[in-house]
Amino acid sequence: MTPRECGQPIAANPLGEKVLTQMRKGVLEYCVLAHLRCGPSYGLEMAAALGRHRWLFTSEGTLYPLLARLRRQGWVETTWRPSDAGPPRRYYGLTAQGEAAVAAFTEVWAPFRAEVDSVLSPVDPASAHRDGPVTDGFEGDER
């Protein structure tokens, strides 16, 4: 059983949970769109698929508002389909705009992740700032 299934937080401390929450907010919508590249899916089906990624997805409570927002943005469209297990289900499908959004995210994700990893990685003090101090373009503002 995973920590999340036991009701335990994933991160080791409350600050880590806050950081993780913010990170999820930035990437979850693109992960939902990526999931929909395989074809239309209904909410519980998406929740089960994304739920296998415990660092990424926590609950259906975050999924349905996200799907509503993606629909308002025109990135997903919905259709109702009959279900053998009860009432009809709302299926979400990727639109051309949604495909473009996930393609753009995919294009920038690897270099973005590499940059973050390089900043977070331990640095050999002997090689740090070989090319001089890093600045953000403001005079006298060295990092």
Image: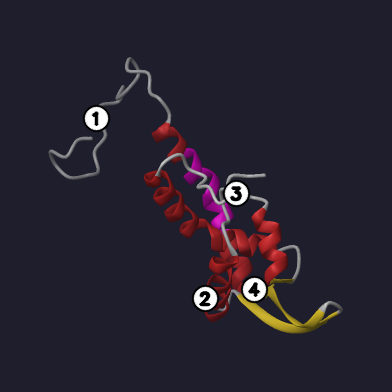
Q: Residue at x 30, y 25 (%)?
A: 131
What is the x, y in percent for residue 48?
Answer: 70, 60
Q: What is the C-alpha distance between the residues marked 2 and 1?
A: 42 Å
N-terminal of the pair, mark 2 or mark 4, is 2
Residue identifier under label 3: 6
Q: Quadrant of residue 51?
A: bottom right
Which range of residues does the magenta coloring cover?
103-114
Tell me the residue that label 4 is attached to.
Answer: 96
- Magenta segment includes 110: yes
SS assignment at label 1 = loop
Residue that extends furthest to the front in the rendered view of this protein:
6
Q: CA distance from mark 2 to mark 4?
A: 16 Å
Q: Looking at the picture, which amino acid does disc 1 mark?
A: Pro
Residue under the point 39% across and 35% down: 119
Q: Amino acid at mark 2?
A: Arg
Check whether the beta carbons of the residues at disc 2 and disc 1 lie within 8 A of each other.
Answer: no
Type of amino acid at the residue the image marks with label 3: Cys
Who is closer to the viewer here, 114 or 16? 16
Q: Gap in Å between the C-alphas at discs 3 and 1? A: 47 Å
x and y percentages locating residue 27 in the rendered image:
52, 56
Report the residue marked by disc 1. 133
Q: Residue under circle 2?
A: 69
Q: What is the secondary structure assignment of the residue under circle 4?
A: helix
Left or right: where 21 falls relative to 45: left
Quadrant occupied by the N terminus: top right
At horizontal 41% and vertical 34% (from top left) the residue drawn is 120
Image coordinates of residue 92 in percent, x first then y, are 68, 75
Q: Disc 2 on helix, strand or loop? A: helix
| Disc nearest the viewer among 3 and 1 | 3
Magenta portion: prevailing SS class: helix
